[in-house]
Amino acid sequence: MPLLDAILENNIRLLDYERMCDRQGQHVVAFGKYTGVACMINILNGLGLCLLILGHHTPFMHIGPTHNYRNTEMARQSIRDTGYEISLGMMPKSIGSLMFIFTGTGNVPQGAQEIVQELPHEYVSVKALKNLKLLNK
């Protein structure tokens, strides 16, 4: 909310380009799958940095920001390497479970989910989500 207040106070205009439509209501601009891929890589990089600031050294520290990779295969390999370390139990037990929630079925969430599939994961349906108990192992 403080960020929204600052945006309003400074008369900053936010644009949602994905919602641009022609006269027939058809989208004229849309984000593609690689937007989701790039964003998820950056999210995992940011997660590693955030956890480090909180005092946790995690395998996510091996994932760089998207612009550090020459292509998506290099980034995916870095994420697979991270997943391998996670599967070896190298995540601090004090962190517990991590949950990523994807909304929508468009290009962006599909690209993001492709990246998460490179990590050890378990999909949980929306119906099962309310009964989910996260464990600190």
Image: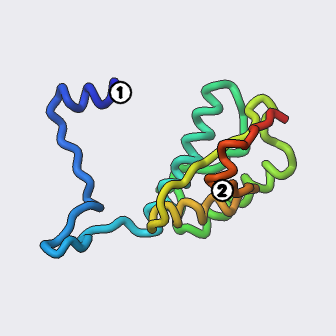
Q: What secondary structure is marked by label 2?
A: loop
Mark 1–mark 2 distance (CA, rounded to whole Å):
29 Å
- Indicate the position of residue 98 as horizontal and vertical percent values: 68, 42
Please rate how many residues cluster around mark 1, counting C-alpha atoms within 10 Å: few if below 14, some from 14 to 19, many from 20.
few
Quarter placement of the N terminus: top left
Along the viewing direction, whichever of 2 and 105 lies nearer the viewer: 105
Q: Is residue 86 left or right of residue 115?
A: right
The answer to whether the residue labelled 1 contacts the one labelled 2, judged by CB atoms less than 8 Å apart, is no
- Indicate the position of residue 117 as horizontal and vertical percent values: 67, 62
Against 85, residue 23 (above or below) is below
Q: Is residue 57 left or right of residue 2?
A: right
Q: Is residue 127 left or right of residue 4?
A: right
In the rendered image, which quarter is residue 61 located in? top right
In the rendered image, which quarter is residue 74 located in? bottom right
**Residue drawn at 55 percent across, 41 percent down:** 46
The amino acid marked with disc number 2 is: Ser
Q: What secondary structure is marked by label 1?
A: loop
The amino acid marked with disc number 1 is: Met
Can you identify the residue that label 1 sits on? 1
